Image (cartoon, rainbow, N blue to C red):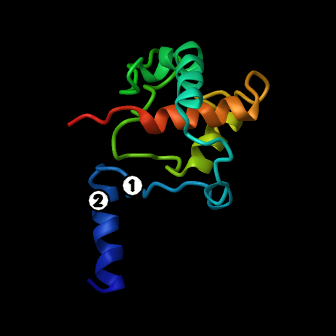
Amino acid sequence: MDSRHLRIAIAVVALAGIGPIVTAQGDPDAAKIKNPVAPTPESIDAGRQIYLRNCASCHGRNGQGGPGNDLIPAAPSLVDETWDHGSTDGEIFSNIRDGVAPDFNMVPFKDKLKDDEIWSVVNYIRSMPKPK
């Protein structure tokens, strides 16, 4: 498809009310950050405990997402293939530490959790069973 036909297709989709075509984009700088905490059983268990205290109320005990409410949108699944804000360890760490802007439906945890605790949560999320 040449660029003229692509522009026409995008315009038709937008005018039809189907919605904009958006590709998921993470943070290229955060994507470069490597996890300094090895995914040991101890780290994963620590991450599980932190996750259950701080994350499960929105993302579900098994990471399958939450329903949301009148004030906040549904929290996304952490065990599917769709990662709207980046899927690398560094991007996940950054999202937990800094929250998800611009609306901050996911608040930052940088004042509540230490960096190594956040990395353990990243390790735990990576260990969660994926649905079949």
Identified by mark 1, the residue type is Pro
Q: In the rendering, at what x and y percent does residue 48 appear?
A: 52, 22
Residue lying at 65% horizontally and 60% vertically, measured from the top left: 32
x and y percent of residue 24 in the render?
46, 54
> Secondary structure beneath disc 1?
loop
Residue 37, compared with residue 24, is above or below; it is above
Q: What numbered label is drawn on residue 13?
A: 2
Name the residue: 44% across, 19% down.
68
Q: Which residue is mark 1?
A: 20
Q: Disc 1 versus disc 2: distance between alpha carbons?
A: 7 Å
Taking the image as shown, residue 44 lies to the left or right of residue 109, namely left
Q: Amino acid at mark 2?
A: Val
- Asked if the residues shown at circle 1 and circle 2 are in contact, with their CB atoms under 8 angstroms apart, the answer is yes
Outermost residue toward the front?
A: 41
User: For the point 37% across and 46% down, which residue is it?
Assistant: 82
Question: Which image quarter: residue 92?
Answer: top right
Residue 57 point in image, percent of width and height: 49, 14
Q: Give the farthest residue toward the right.
A: 111
State which quarter of the image contains the N terminus: bottom left
Q: Earlier in the sequence, mark 1 or mark 2?
A: 2
Residue 100 visible to an observer of this rendering: no
